[in-house]
Image (tube, rainbow, N blue to C red):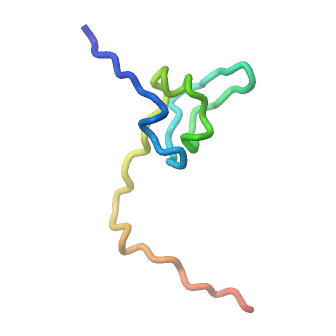
Amino acid sequence: MPLERRMSREMFPAGQEVVLKQYCFTPGRVFEPGKYIAGDLPDVAFEMGLVEQLPPVKGKNEQIKNPPDTSEK
């Protein structure tokens, strides 16, 4: 017997970037698969299990620095 994985919007902070795995149809809009901010997606996408967290970034993030500003003032 398979385990059911129930998800809800509360599992993700509103500003977190998530991945919508497949199309989500609502009466007002069609959401295509891709990256979204969790707060922008409808509740039904979370309830149906269509949303996942983005995988962690590989590499040494602390070594990545912003490039110096070379624009002239």
Residue lying furthest bottom = 73
Residue situated in front as seen by the camera: 72 or 26 = 26
> Where residue 36 appears, x then y in whole percent?
58, 42
- Compared to 5, does 18 lie above or below? below
Q: Residue at x 33, y 67 (%)?
A: 60
Residue lying furthest top = 1
> Where residue 65 appears, x then y in whole percent?
45, 77
Q: Residue at x 35, y 22 (%)?
A: 5
- Compared to 71, does 37 lie above or below? above
Residue situated in front as seen by the camera: 71 or 10 = 10
Q: Residue at x 53, y 80 (%)?
A: 67
- Compared to 55, does 6 lie above or below? above
Residue situated in front as seen by the camera: 13 or 20 = 13
Q: Quadrant of the C terminus?
A: bottom right
Dividing the picture into quadrants, the one containing residue 38 is top right
Q: Residue at x 41, y 27 (%)?
A: 7
> Where residue 46 appears, x then y in whole percent?
50, 27
Q: Quadrant of the N terminus?
A: top left
> Where residue 33 appears, x then y in whole percent?
58, 33
Figure label count: 0
